Image: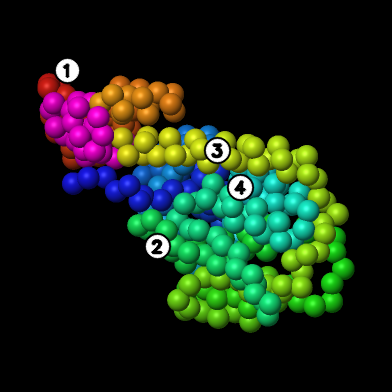
Amino acid sequence: MNIKTTQSSVLASWVLAIYRTIQSYGVNPDPLLKHAGIEKALLSQHQARIPSETSNELWRLAVVATKDPLIGARVPEYMTLNTLYAVDAAAQASSTIREFLRSTCRFSRIVTTAVELVLEEQSDGSELCFTELGDIPLCDQAVDAFMFVIVLTLQPVLQVIDYSEPFFLEVDVTRPKPKNATLYEEAFNCAINYECQRNRVRINSNFLNIELPSANPAFTRLSEEMLVGYLSRMQNQDIEMKVRGAIMELMGVQSLSKEKVASRINTSVRNLTRKLNEVELTFNQLVDSIRQEKAISLIKQLDVCFAEITFQLGFVDVN
């Protein structure tokens, strides 16, 4: 079986915000991270990425542990300056609200590759549309978090302009209507439609040309250079996720090798080595890291003998 090339991912600092949100309920997030298969050390690496499948599992576990299906709506409260990797800062330095929204759409892939954010301009009301990408659909809590982040990032912009008309016109979400629907109504102050075919936010087109007093072309240029650089590196970092997946699938094979892993992800050994070098990793580093993580997990399972652990880690004998 080949590794999927469409696997989506989210920024580790975004998952850290989820972690902090879970903590705010008095719940220890560490067991949830472990159960979801997320390395806690990754959360402090602001450029690291985590598969959407595992972040969705963390959301599921968080809902069970906190008993709050709307936990996603609280994530913006626990974001820090680097949670969105300066995507929000670059947008807020834009010249107009239109440029603000376009910048947000352009760099939204840095936060998650599970969704494409697109601004569709229309005379009677423009739309911010969320198109799901990859192989992992958005869970309800992720939808909530993204929607409420939009409100949070727009607040500094809307607070410094004078307007009498409503900015948000209508919101469509794929999630079912929550028991506490007032959270959505108070945040957007407009009609909220649930169980829709897609997620979108309709906004007043009259606002798009408004100039922002916070405009800073020099800062925008520097920020965009950094963001474009990260997008470029993301393409290379995808190789780490593919190689990790292949190693984990082949770990029980006694003759685990770079050749077998390269074949599993449909590339050559030479290309595999080159791609790993580009992200400052080696094949042996990844194997050792995964073996260590798996060994610790298996040793904690008292019903698993050392002979079985040895086999699962791809070693020849227990010693």
- Describe residue 243's horizontal placement relative to residue 97 as left or right: left
* Residues tagged 2 and 3 counted as in contact (Cβ below 8 A): no
Locate residue 212 relative to residue 289 in the image: left or right. Answer: right
Which one is in front in this view, the residue at disc 2 or the one at disc 1? 2
**Tag shown at residue 84:** 4
Quadrant hosting residue 121? bottom right
Q: Where residue 180 appears, x then y in whole percent?
A: 58, 76
Q: Is residue 273 above or below residue 96?
A: above
- Kindly identify the residue that appears in the image at 51 percent across and 79 percent down: 194
Q: Residue at x 51, y 38 (%)?
A: 232
Tag 3: amino acid = Tyr
Q: Residue at x 72, y 72 (%)?
A: 205
> How far, Cα to Cα, is label 4 from label 1?
46 Å
Q: Determine if residue 309 is in view.
A: no
Q: Which mark is residue 137?
A: 2
Looking at the rendered structure, the kind of residue marked 4 is Leu
Residue carrying label 3: 230
* Extent of the magenta region: 244-268
Q: Residue at x 61, y 71 (%)?
A: 127
Of badges 3 and 4, the one in the foreground is 3
For marks 2 and 3 on the same chain, the one whose residue lies earlier in the sequence: 2
Q: Which residue is mark 1?
A: 319
Q: What separation in Å lies between label 4 and label 2 (alpha carbons)? A: 21 Å
Task: Determine the CA span between mark 1 and mark 3.
Answer: 43 Å
> Earlier along the polypeptide chain: callout 4 or callout 2?
4
Q: Quadrant of residue 295?
A: top left
